[in-house]
Amino acid sequence: MPTEVILPKVDMDMATGSIASWHVAEGEEVAKGQPLFDIETDKAAMEVESPASGRLHHVSVEVGSEVPIGTTLAWIYADGEDVGPPPEHATSAVTDDHVVSSDAGAPRAVLVDQSAKASELQGNSSSAKQRATPAARKLATQSHVDLADVTGSGPRARVQRADVERLLDVPAPDAIAVPALPWSTQQGDLSVLSSGSGEAAPWVLIHGFAADASGWSAVEKQLRMSAAVHRIELPNHGRSPRRKVADFRDLVSQMRQAFDGLGDQPVRLVGHSLGAAVSLALADTRPRRIESLTLISPAGLGPEINGVVLAGIARASRPESLGPWLKQLTGDPDVVTPNYVQAAARQRPDGQGRAAQASMMDALFPDGVQAFDLHAALSRLECPTRIIWGRRDAIVPWKHALRAPGQVALHLFDDVGHLPHVEIPEQVCALMML
Amino acid sequence: MTGEAHTDSSLRQLSYAEAIREAMDIALAADERVILMGEDIGVYGGAFQVTGDLVHKYGEDRVMDTPISELGGAGVAVGAAMTGLRPVFEFQFSDFAALAMEQIVNQAAKVRFMLGGAASVPVVMRFPAGSGTGAAAQHSQSLEAWFGHVPGLKVVQPSTPEDAKGLLLAAIEDPDPVMIFEHKILYKMKGTVPDGHYTTPIGTAAVRRSGADLTIVATSLMVHKALEAAATLADEAVDAEVIDLRTVRPMDRDTVLASVRKTGRLLCVYEGVKTLGVGAEVSAMVAESDAFDFLDAPIVRLGGAESPIPYNPELEKAVVPQVPDILNAARQLAGGTV
C-alpha cells in the first residue's frame, strides 16, 4: 500500500497552504526523512520531510495553488509496489487542532516536521499565544497563573476574567470577610522563642499575619551567632494562645506586654508586615528600649492591602488551597515549592485557630483595608530605622515606603515580593546589622 | 415662559427647545455683547422655532436674520466675535455647515493660535442635527466628528433640556468657538430645567445610570436609547452604566476611564457614521489608557451605517442604532460572547 502525502498542519492557525516547490520530481526516488517539498502558509515557509521511502507518484497539487490542510498531494510507492491509478483519498480532512498523524492500518499519512512540533508545543504552553482579555491577563499575572492552564469560556476559547477567577476561586469582594466561626480563647502568655547569645544588643523579631516564628528561621540562623534572638509570636499565631484582638491598638498592647517581659536592655527590633506595624508602634511608645528598627514590607503606612490573598491564606487548611495564595507572597512564585506548601499547610493552625486568625484579620483589615495608619509614628522615630521592601510585593504596595521621612533608610529590591527575609535572607541580615 | 411664576422650580418642565431659548434670553438680558444670528431666526422664529419671539423682546439689531448664505453669515459672526461681540449663530440644519467650513475651521478655530493669543473668537454655532425627521440625506446627518477633529474648536452635544440650557450658557461665556449639536428629535422633549442662570461645564460627561456590568458611552439622542435599553437589561440582571458624553471635544477622559475600570466592558453608541466617528475616539482613548488592562471583552461600537440617511422611514431607522441593537450588543458583551 503506498503512503499518502498530505498537506500537513504546521501552524495552529493554519487552514490552507500551498506548495512552494517539490524537492523530488514525479517518479523520482526519495528516502524517508529527506526533504520532500516546501510549504508556504500566510505566515511562513517551511520544509517538509518525506514520510516514507520510495518513489513519488500521482503528484496532484501544482506549485503555488492553495489547498486546505489534509489535501492529498501525492503518493509514495515502496520498492516493488505496483503503480496503478491513484488510490482513494485515505484520510479525512483535518479539522482538529492536531497535526495529522498516521493511523494504524490506513496508509501512513504524514509528516510531522520539527516546526510542526514546535508550534504545537507552543500552543500548549505559552501564555503569549493563548487568547485572553486584558483583564484576564492582568489577573493571571498578578496571581502567577499560567494562562495556558485556564480554559477560556469566551468566543474562540478566549480566556475572560471570570475563567481565571474560577481557577483561583476568588471570593467576590463582599465575600472576602471570613464567616465567623466559633472559637474559644485560651489562657497564657504570648509565645517567645529565644536562641543565641552574645555581647551585642539582642534581636527581637515579630512575624506577620498568618505566619509564625518559623518564618524567621533563615534570618535567625545568622543572627544568633552574635546576639540573643527573641521571636515573639502574635496572638492566634504559632504557639501563642488564642485571644480576642479588638483592633490594632489592642494588638499592640498585648504585644507590648510580651516585649516588656524581655527586660530593660535596648534591643534591635525587627518586624515583618503586620509585625512591622506592631514593631513601629512599640518603638513609638518605648523609644529608649530600641537601638535600631528594621521594618520589612511593613503594614500601616497606607490603606491598601491585598485582602483577597490574606483571606485566602487565613481560610486555607490544605496544601491545595494554600499553595496558590502562597505563590503570591514571593517575587518569584517558583520559590514556593510544593514541599514548602506542604510544610506551610502542616503549620497552619487547626479550625479554631484559623477562625481566630480570621476574626483578627477582620478587626485589623476590615473590607481589605488597613484600618490603622502609622505614618505619624514613623516621623517621630529617633532610632536608626530602615525599611526593606520588594518591588514585586503583591500584598502591601511597596510604594507606601515612599511616605517615609528622610531619616528612614529605604532598601527596595527589584525582583523580591512580600517576603524579603525568606527570599533574600543574607542581604536582609546584612542590612539589619548595618 | 420666563415671566411665569413657578411655585416649585425643581419640578419645572421645559422642552429642549424652550430651554435653549431661555438660555439665549438670559444671555441677551445679562450681556449686551450677546447677539443672535441666523436664517429666519427673527420674525419666523427659527426653522425649528427655537428662537421663537426673542426678536420682539430684543429687536432686530440683536436677533438678526441673515441672508441665505451660510458662509457669509458664519463669516460675519466670526468677525463680530473678533470685535468683542458674543454671537450665537444658528444653522437651519447642521448639514449646511459644509458651506461655512472655511469660516469655522480655517478662521474661527485658528485665529487665537495664529495671532499668538492677541485675539479670540467667542462665537457659538448652533447646529440642529440628526436623523429621524424624514428630512433625508442632506438634512439628517450627525457631523460632530468633523468638528471634533479640529484643534481650537469645542464641540458639545446636549441630550437633556437642562444641559441644553447649561451648555449653551457655558458656550456663550467661553472665550473660544463652541459648536453645539442639538438633536432635532430632542427639541420637543421635556425635562426638568433649573430657573435662572447656571452653566453645565464643557468637557464633563454625566453618568446617567450607574451600573457594574458594562459601560455604555452614548451621545445626544443615543443617550435616551441607551437608557431605555439599560432599563430592559436591568430586568435581565445586566447592570449597565450609561455615560452621556455631553462634550465631544475636549472629551471627559476621567469619567469614561473610571467607568471602564469598574465594568471592564465598553459599548459606544453614537449616531454619526461609525467609521472614524466619536465612538472611534472613545474606543482608542480607552485602548491607549491604563483602563485597557481592565477590559474583559473587545470594545464594541454601534454607529451610523456606511450610507447617506435614506428618505424611506424604515431605512432611515435601519441606518442608525436603535434600542434593539443596543440590547443585542449589550447582552453579548455582558454575556462574554463578543
Image (cartoon, rainbow, N blue to C red):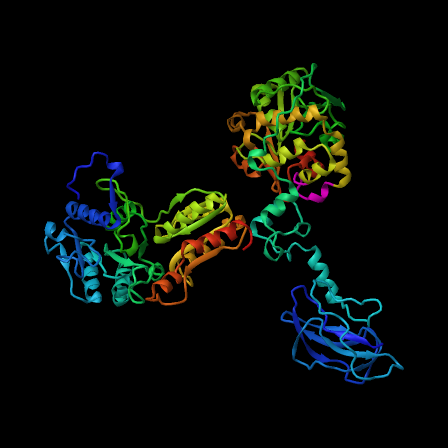
The residue stretch that appears in magenta: A327-336
From the viewer's perspective, tell me whether residue B242 is left or right of residue A34.
left
The majority secondary structure of the magenta stretch comes to loop
Residue closer to the observer: A30 or A264? A30
Position of residue B246 measured from the top left corner of the image (x, y, whole percent): 34, 50
Residue ID at (79%, 79%) = A87
Above or below B109: residue B295: above
From the viewer's perspective, tell me whether residue A415 is left or right of residue B70.
right
> Image quarter for residue A109?
bottom right
Residue closer to the observer: A344 or B221? B221
Residue ID at (81%, 78%) = A76
**Can I make out residue A99 in this image?**
yes
Residue ID at (77%, 84%) = A25
| Residue B240 part of the magenta segment | no
**Can I make out residue B258 in this image?**
no
Above or below B205: residue A56: below
Residue closer to the observer: A208 or A280? A208
| Residue A334 part of the magenta segment | yes
Position of residue B227 measured from the top left corner of the image (x, y, whole percent): 40, 47
Position of residue B80 measured from the top left corner of the image (x, y, whole percent): 17, 58
Position of residue A165 measured from the top left corner of the image (x, y, whole percent): 62, 43
